Amino acid sequence: KNEVEQSPQNLTAQEGEFITINCSYSVGISALHWLQQHPGGGIVSLFMLSSGKKKHGRLIATINIQEKHSSLHITASHPRDSAVYICAVLQSNFGNEKLTFGTGTRLTIIP
Amino acid sequence: SAVISQKPSRDICQRGTSLTIQCQVDSQVTMMFWYRQQPGQSLTLIATANQGSEATYESGFVIDKFPISRPNLTFSTLTVSNMSPEDSSIYLCSGNRGTYNEQFFGPGTRLTVL
């Protein structure tokens, strides 16, 4: 079983729909990242959070540390949101830090 | 923030050859990393590039196959040596400034080995 699981693996939606991508993890973490990867391969960091909720434009990320679960929401989705969204958890252990990545959720927004 | 560029952006190589990928950051970062993303898979850390000393490799990755240099705080190279089709992947460079709170990623190098 992977330490970081994302669902769904693939998601196709109509423009304007509200999107939710989920991330569950099985290890203790100090923080969680949501990343966006476009078809060319480049990655952009969307959020880093360790508790609660963060909002940036139409994107909202929440995390529940007790339940080891995070969600990424996109409101009023647009075709330019089409990308792979990756959840990555940060583990800190005696000063050593390690990022573990989920396999990603491929989002396609249809005009 | 920091902007990371990589060269080449993509390449098609023959089996048995080697390719060196360059990673340039527009400002100093503390730590630099090299990741591999095989088709349909998540990112896997290859190694941490240490300035002026040998890289720290993760389990399953060795210096002979993936030699890494980091001569200063803004530049690193990864060489994929004696390539085989199994090395076909996206290779990503990333950096941070002491903590993972600020994690920056390069655009990736898409490598195809025939």
Image (cartoon, rainbow, N blue to C red):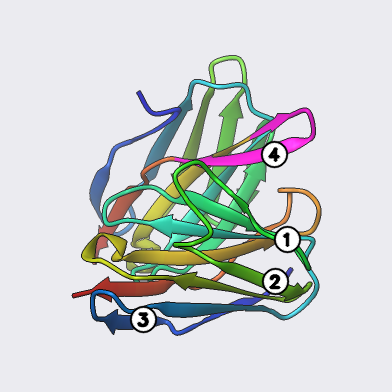
Q: Real-space Cα distance between discs 3 and 4? A: 30 Å
Counting residues from the N terminus, which is met first, the one under dot 2 or under dot 1? 1
Q: Report the amino acid beneath label 4.
A: Glu
Q: Residue tagged by mark 2?
A: B70
Residue A13: x and y, percent? 24, 51
Task: Find out whether the residues at labels 2 and 1 contact each other: C-beta distance under 8 Å.
Answer: yes
Residue A97 numbered tag: 4
Counting residues from the N terminus, which is met first, the one under dot 3 or under dot 1? 3
Q: Real-space Cα distance between discs 4 and 1? A: 15 Å
Nearer mark to the viewer, of 4 and 1: 1
Discs 3 and 1 carry the same chain letter: yes
Q: Report the amino acid beneath label 1.
A: Asn
Q: Residue tagged by mark 1?
A: B50
Circle count: 4
The foreground one among A18 and B90 is B90
Q: Main secondary structure of the magenta part?
A: strand
Discs 4 and 1 carry the same chain letter: no
In the rendered image, the vertical position of residue A91 relative to residue A75, given as above or below: above
Residue A76: x and y, percent? 41, 55
Task: Please report, as a chain letter, where disc 4 is located.
Answer: A
Q: Quadrant of the N terminus of chain A?
A: top left
Q: Report the amino acid beneath label 2.
A: Arg
In the rendered image, the vertical position of residue B12 relative to residue A93, given as above or below: below
Nearer mark to the viewer, of 3 and 2: 2
